[in-house]
Amino acid sequence: MSAIKALIPGFLLTWTISSLIGSQGSRGGLLAITHTYYQGHMFYWSWPLFCGATALAWLIFSLLD
């Protein structure tokens, strides 16, 4: 259950950080931030950041249980 709960903070952290860094024109180095279009909406996304943020949130939720 902790893994499911960790998806929400992982998504929010990724979306916030990617938007801040990507809107400045940077790719974020190892973060590999990409400019993505989905159904007419544009946003910035980073899979490495999402995986890391979700793992961190999962660890925190696991320690709290």
Image (cartoon, rainbow, N blue to C red):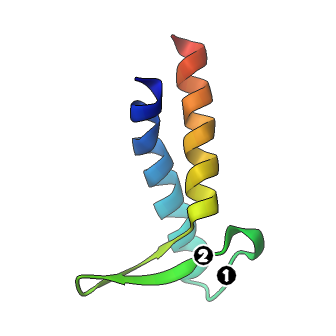
| Residue shown at 40% from the left, 23% from the top | 1
Q: What amino acid is labelled 1 in the image? A: Arg
Q: Are marks 2 and 1 in contact (CB under 8 Å)?
A: yes
Q: Residue at x 70, y 75 (%)?
A: 28
Q: Out of 51 and 29, give the one closest to the viewer.
A: 51
Check disc 2: other Cα within 10 Å, few if <14, some if 14-19, many if 20+: many
Q: Secondary structure at mark 2?
A: loop
Please provide percent x and percent y for residue 13: 52, 53
**As drawn, is 37 to the left or to the right of 53?**
left
Number of other residues with Cα within 10 Å of mark 1, as a class: few under 14, some 14 to 19, many 20 or more: some
- Residue for badge 1: 27
Most distant residue in the right direction: 29
Q: Please tell me which residue is depicted at 56% across the width and 63% down the height of the picture.
A: 47
- Amino acid carrying label 2: it is Ile
**Which numbered circle lies on residue 61?**
none
Q: Position of residue 64 (x, y in %)?
A: 55, 14
> Distance from label 2 to label 1 (Cα)?
5 Å
Residue carrying label 2: 33
**Disc with the residue nearer the chain's start (2 vs 1):** 1
Q: Position of residue 57 (x, y in %)?
A: 56, 35
Residue at the (61%, 74%) spot, across then down: 21
Q: Does 11 appear above or below 3?
A: below
